[in-house]
């Protein structure tokens, strides 16, 4: 598979066209807007945290296929996870999209592994991580808009 | 004289490069363009044969460097038909030229509640320096709106003038939309109100004949790297009368006549505005680039790029779901567009895989994106070495994009 075809594989295109858990979450107790000034991608992550775990997570926004698919996959994977699990997945995911294929990490990350191909496109790493940095800031209740720059 | 543009293309070594295993199709000329061999050779020659500091050595080598440097100034002066060579001030680029005028002219002439007119289509470098000035002196920005096609209505412009208007700053051509503004008319209107006009020529200078006396603009700025010359150098043209009364922008060597701890007197134009050792090789290289453009003829370049614009507009508009942003009647060779259902950033990555280099983003013109309610566009921009085949490659690439997102 060419690097490009891997980047835009069916799962990613599908998530970008039909993002899961898309929409504002009125019941959220954490939310945060993230912005990539370079390409204008902007999304907001909403989290309902209950007893230290993510009970529900949704997002809205517009962006490129990579940033939307990454946000969509993130919401699927993180639902029900504890803060400690979220941190671990965040770190593993960050490593995967910056360093590329790694059998152990891909096994651990499950469906998120489809984004491993992003590492071949350094200019697109920020797209894949925008939702994730926004999530982290939301959980930390950081007052500022998250910017990739 | 007919120009063989295909032959000229062969004079640009970088265009023979491959990218991602494919021949490079370079369509990002608004960002910067590639350099002809003569310019590259000039830089090399300077460092091999002429390098010395200028305006100070008593030895022959320094005189030689100075002579070449000043020759470039005259080359550029005659190219834009400035009245005097000392009206050509070397700066780092269009950005520094605008900052110089905002800080030197603006700060010494504008007061609280004075107004500066700019337009919606300005590059950030013709917005932010004025915004900084407004914060420093308490002045205000007034912004000319643009129509859906990306044009300024002269009546909207006229309406913004009042007794407090002290400056107009406007792009000759827009990098995000391609629109060419009616500078001569806008300058005449500004002058009726006794207001000077600065023209950001970054996107016009490399693509059409520019005659600063005919335009009758007070300041005109442009960058070498967008005009087939080296990076790191550019020009501020200013009318002598205005430059004379402006205080220096930076202090240092070369810009002084005499220095003591009680009083420093400043050098004459243009040196008053050229503090420190400049990019000597860059200036000489830019002079060679200008000579190269002069030999081809700016009329010929403009005509060639208009052909590309017509062909590209026709080919791209025929693609279902593609919308061109910026459809002014007078345009330089810039086509900005969006494609339904696909983000510009993804288009950029897929085109890159096809060897086609375009720009995806807000093009340092976020107010333009806001005006059209879009986050970004894809922009193809043409230079003298582009051909219809480059546009065909772009169209083919867009078809590949559509297939990925089908
Ligand atoms: C219209 C316009 N003005 C100013 C600039 C700034 O030029 P530079 O970065 O060379 O100073 C650009 C560069 O993209 C431009 O397109």
Image (spheres, helix red, strand yellow):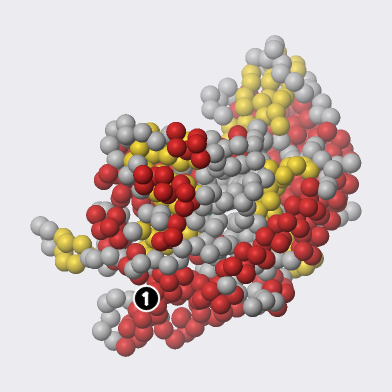
Q: Quadrant of the C terminus of chain A?
A: top right
Q: Position of residue B135 (x, y in %)?
A: 35, 35
Viewer-nearest residue: B305 or B235: B305
Q: Quadrant of residue B76?
A: bottom left
Is residue B27 at least partly visible in the picture?
no
Viewer-nearest residue: B109 or B148: B148
Q: Residues within 10 Å of mark 1 (few under 14, many from 20)?
A: many
Q: Position of residue B156 (x, y in %)?
A: 50, 35
Query: Left or right: where does residue B3 sit relative to residue A81?
Result: left
Q: Is residue B312 above or below residue B164?
A: below
Q: Secondary structure at mark 1?
A: helix
Which residue is found at the position 56% from the left and 29% from the top?
A145
Viewer-nearest residue: B262 or B71: B71
Decide if ligand 1 comes within 8 Å of the CB at mark 1. Answer: no
The total number of labels drawn is 1
Q: Position of residue A29 (x, y in %)?
A: 65, 14
Query: Left or right: where does residue A146 sit relative to residue B257?
Result: right
Q: Quadrant of residue B301?
A: bottom right
Q: Quadrant of residue A113?
A: top right
Q: Position of residue A39 (x, y in %)?
A: 65, 42
Is residue A143 at least partly visible in the picture?
yes
Q: Is residue A72 above or below residue B219?
A: above
Which residue is found at the position 75% from the left and 42% from the top?
B323
Q: Which residue is mark 1?
A: B70
Q: Chain of mark 1?
A: B
Which residue is found at the position 68% from the left and 15% from the top?
A28
């Amino acid at each position: 598979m060419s690097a490009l075809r891997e980047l835009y594989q069916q799962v990613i295109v599908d998530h970008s066209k039909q993002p899961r858990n898309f929409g504002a979450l009125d019941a959220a107790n954490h939310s945060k807007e993230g912005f990539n000034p370079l390409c204008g991608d902007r999304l907001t992550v909403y989290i309902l945290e209950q007893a230290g775990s993510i009970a529900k997570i949704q997002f809205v926004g517009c962006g490129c296929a990579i940033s939307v698919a990454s946000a969509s996959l993130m919401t699927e994977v993180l639902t029900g996870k504890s803060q400690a699990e979220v941190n671990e997945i965040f770190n593993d995911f960050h490593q995967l999209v910056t360093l590329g294929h790694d059998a152990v990490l891909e096994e651990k990350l499950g469906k998120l592994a489809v984004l491993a191909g992003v590492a071949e496109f350094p200019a697109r790493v920020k797209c894949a991580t925008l939702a994730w940095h926004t999530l982290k800031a939301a959980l930390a209740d950081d007052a500022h808009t998250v910017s990739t720059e | 004289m007919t120009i063989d543009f295909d032959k000229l293309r062969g004079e640009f070594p970088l265009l023979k490069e491959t990218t991602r295993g494919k021949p490079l199709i370079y369509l990002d000329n608004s960002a910067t363009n590639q350099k002809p061999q003569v310019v590259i050779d000039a830089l090399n020659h300077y460092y091999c044969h002429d390098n010395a500091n200028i305006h100070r050595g008593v030895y022959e080598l320094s005189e030689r460097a100075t002579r070449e440097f000043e020759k470039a100034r005259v080359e550029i002066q005659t190219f834009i038909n400035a009245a005097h060579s000392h009206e050509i001030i070397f700066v780092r680029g269009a950005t520094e030229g605008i900052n110089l005028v905002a800080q030197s002219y603006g700060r010494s002439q504008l007061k609280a509640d004075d107004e500066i007119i700019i337009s919606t289509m300005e590059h950030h470098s013709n917005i932010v320096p004025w915004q900084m000035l407004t914060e420093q002196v308490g002045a205000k920005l007034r912004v000319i709106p643009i129509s859906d096609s990306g044009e300024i209505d002269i009546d909207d412009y006229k309406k913004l003038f009042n007794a407090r208007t002290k400056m107009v700053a406007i792009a000759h051509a827009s990098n995000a939309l391609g629109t060419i503004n009616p500078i001569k008319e806008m300058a005449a209107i500004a002058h009726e109100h006794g207001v000077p006009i600065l023209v950001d020529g970054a996107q016009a200078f490399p693509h059409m004949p520019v005659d600063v006396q005919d335009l009758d603009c007070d300041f005109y700025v442009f960058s070498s790297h967008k005009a087939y010359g080296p990076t790191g150098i550019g020009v501020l043209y200013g009318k002598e009368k205005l430059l004379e009364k402006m205080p220096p922008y930076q202090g240092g060597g070369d810009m002084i006549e005499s220095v003591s701890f009680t009083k420093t007197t400043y050098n004459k134009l243009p040196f008053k505005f050229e503090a420190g050792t400049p990019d000597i090789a860059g200036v000489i290289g830019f002079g060679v680039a200008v000579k190269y453009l002069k030999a081809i003829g700016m009329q010929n370049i403009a005509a060639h790029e208009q052909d590309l614009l017509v062909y590209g507009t026709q080919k791209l508009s025929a693609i279902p779901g593609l919308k061109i942003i910026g459809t002014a009647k007078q345009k330089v060779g810039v086509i900005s567009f969006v494609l339904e259902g696909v983000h510009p950033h993804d288009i950029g990555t897929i085109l890159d895989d096809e060897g086609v280099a375009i720009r995806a983003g807000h093009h340092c013109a976020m107010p333009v994106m806001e005006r059209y309610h879009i986050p970004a566009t894809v922009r193809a921009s043409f230079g003298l070495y582009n051909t219809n085949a480059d546009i065909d490659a772009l169209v083919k690439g867009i078809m590949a994009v559509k297939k990925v997102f089908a």
